[in-house]
Amino acid sequence: MFGKKKNADADAIENSNVSDTNEAANETDDDRSDDDLKSEKQFTFKDTLRLYVTGIITGMLIIALVNIIFDIFDFHPFSRFTAADRIYDRSQEVEAYIDKFYWKSDTSDEQFAESAAKGMVAALDDPFSVYLTKNELENSEKKHKGDYVGIGCTIGADPKKEHRYILSITEGKPADKAGLKENDEIIAIDGNPVKGKDIDYMIDKIAEKTGVTYKFTVLRDGKQLDFDVTTENIVNQSVKYKMIENNIGYISVSNFDGESSKQFKSAVDALDKRKAKALIIDLRNNGGGIMSASLDMLDRLLPAGQLITETRKGYKDTIYKSTNKEKYDNPIVLLVNPGTASASEIFAGCLQDRASSKLVGEKTYGKGIVQTLFHISEKRGDGIKLTTGQYLLPSGRSINDKGLTPDYEVKFTGKESDYETKKDNQLQKAIEILS
């Protein structure tokens, strides 16, 4: 895991000055000339120098070769970091106790290493910074891309993290076609129980390739049912739209991914053609996503001007701006709640600052930080997501740990099935404002 720092002492080569006044030698070499003696002394010096230089070069080559070997095997015994030394020492001690006393031995070295890396990042006490294994990193990138291999449903866990449920179903996708429904409790996949299993494990199992059929065993209304579901490539539909009463356009944005911007622009264009006199943009329970998607969508609505400022420690501020390529001139009202976070808060805050758009609902989550994803090792395929700065809205205000306060605070009084209906009191308030 980490190399332990050691003190390496190089062997010193000492050159002794040998006296030329050796009486025994003089007695046997009286017949040699002074030139012969000088030649012998000169040869001895050059020979010693040659050996000395050769030794140095050989030593350097050996060190270089050892370093290359260490790099190949990802082994670094001479650590430059004090923290790494302490971690190494402590992990050695803990490992010794585990090897000697722990009654099972089914944890691999790789699992220990991954857990240690996760623990280091957890020590930052930042809920948004995380170490990602290869599978976690791949799943994260697939999610933000906007298209993925799957069955078109969202899987969640109960608070005890034992039972696994289907939280939502995408209409027309494999899960829906097979007959799975929201709130179905997943018992097994292909006969393998999933109780207590990590959700990423379940996603990985059904996200390897298209055209694979899995048997889902679920519990519904006390009955155990089996459904055969075949995976396919799914493009996430994060944007939905429709015309509602009083000639108002309604757009729901569930998250910001690689497909959201294109879908949003198509929605605005379609509602424009239908002569919508205003827009309601629903960002409730939108946890964010790719910031670039949020900025692209703002560029469709706002004229040229400043959007957000990205501040990072040790770096010059980066300012993002909208162009004058497109704009929307009609009124906009946004629906927000505590589930509105990150990129969706930036989106709402920019419209509130730049277009005087009104926010209806409840105070938002309060996440306005810059997160950067780093790929650590190409060999392992792992990565680390770190908080590296924060975003400021056009007015200069920060939403981090503060959130956005709605212009009209309206607490939702219905249940989830009441969204987008006459019982949706937040939506009805937005319609009232625009009417």
Image: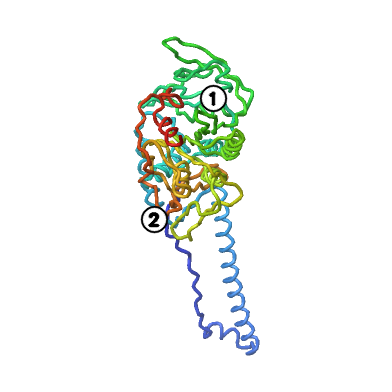
Residue 359 appears in view: yes
Residue lying at 50% horizontally and 28% vertically, measured from the top left: 245
Q: Neighbour class for label 2 at 10 Å: few (<14), some, many (≥20)?
A: few
Q: What is the x, y in percent for residue 431?
A: 45, 32
* Residue 219 vertical placement versus 359 (above, below): above
Q: Would residue 17 appear left or right of 119 to someone viewing this image?
A: right
Mark 2 vs mark 1, CA separation in Å:
50 Å
User: Callout 2, which amino acid?
Assistant: Thr
Does 26 appear above or below 210? below
Question: In the rendered image, which residue does mark 1 sit on?
Answer: 170
Where, by quadrant of the figure, is residue 195 drawn?
top left
Q: Amino acid at mark 1?
A: Thr
Residue that mark 2 sits on: 82
Which residue is found at the position 52% from the left and 86% from the top? 21
Compared across the picture, whether 198 is left or right of 60 comes to left
The residue mark sitting in front, 2 or 1, is 1
Number of numbered discs on residues: 2
